[in-house]
Image (tube, helix red, strand yellow):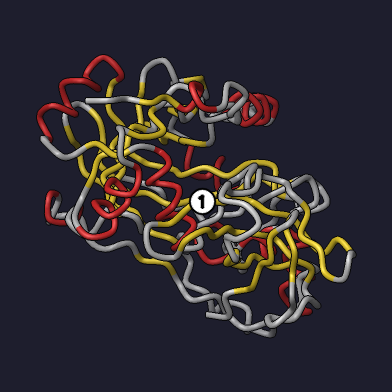
Amino acid sequence: MTVVMVEDLDPSSADAGVAAHYGDPMREQRTLATAVGLVDRSNRDVIAVPGEERASWLHTLTTQHLSDLSGLSGSELLVLSPHGHVEQHAYVTEDGETAWLDTEPGAGAGLLKYLEMMRFFSKVEPRDATPEIAVLSLVGPGAADLFPELAEPRVGAVPGPKFAAGSVPAHATSRYAVREFEGGLARRVPLGVDLLVPRETRTRVIEALGVPMAGLWAYEAIRVERRIPRLGWETDHRTIPAEADFIASAVHLDKGCYRGQETVARVHHLGRPPRRLVLLHFDGIASDQPPAQGTPVTLDDREVGFVGTAVRHHELGMIALAVLKRNVPDDAALRVGESVAAVDPA
């Protein structure tokens, strides 16, 4: 089997360390879209948070309602700056003794530094668990069939701008079913099932599952199609949660104080964040290569946003997630480099 690593194609990529594809990226995409494939995402950073006060501690530090975190359960969280800008995003997976936070490659050090800084006298012991735990992702409609006991992901509806206090249920806004699996954990998520397994068992788990391998290119194409944002790709230093569609899955709008809460509340109640996440379609004429992350999006020669993740999709052609100014209309004639781009209004 041909394996092409991310760093073989882009030595500077933050996603180095995993396969970009296995010889046929479009076939791999179709597998993820119609059946099930296994994507090696073991380059993700993992932070372990054991300790009897981990639930209440994470609840006070992050945007998510986690005070009842217990047993086998999962969710998502953000860490914000004092001004409400997104600094960290992580999935949280609880096994009854430890909360495991998996985040983007290279983001773990910053997350761990913040957690250690905020320990004070709390009974928690955060540590870097990246050398211990590898993340593998089963993606596609067939992933649920391999773990039928895991309930579908539940993501709560975002309340309106003037919602009544106490109207948002007092639990995590996204709830992901979790079970033990091969010495690790299996977590049901919107794209399928994530596996957090001991790194030394990674190869054995892959072989035992017997599922076709798909590279990160295929995973990213499905993620972009589903409009799922990614820290560092669809965010910059100014991003607030509402601009990158993190509100539903990672922010509880009616919980106690946390850093950056004032900005979140103010923007939500006004109902108009300065920017928004959109899906762009490219004409594919001027260039057959997806634009790089951070490429400016322009309207009448005026910069109105930036490209996050751009991919070549097996059905939709060249598409990208982008962050645009709120006042850019859906029918605007946008340009990204030499290419014409259009907002998908769905």
Identify the residue at horizontal 47%, vertical 43% (top origin).
55
- Specify the amino acid type for callout 1: Val
| Residue 71 relative to residue 171: left or right | left
Residue 134: image location, x then y, percent: 35, 26
Identify the residue at horizontal 59%, vertical 59% (top origin).
321
Towards the viewer: 207 or 320 = 320
Residue 282: image location, x then y, percent: 60, 64
Q: Can residue 63 be seen in this view?
A: yes
Quadrant of residue 111 in the image? top right
Identify the residue at horizontal 71%, vertical 73% (top origin).
268
Image quadrant for the N terminus?
top left
Q: In this view, does 274 lie above or below 229?
A: below
Identify the residue at horizontal 15%, vertical 21% (top origin).
204
Residue beneath label 1, please?
Answer: 311
Q: Is residue 61 visible?
A: no
| Residue 267 relative to residue 160: left or right | right
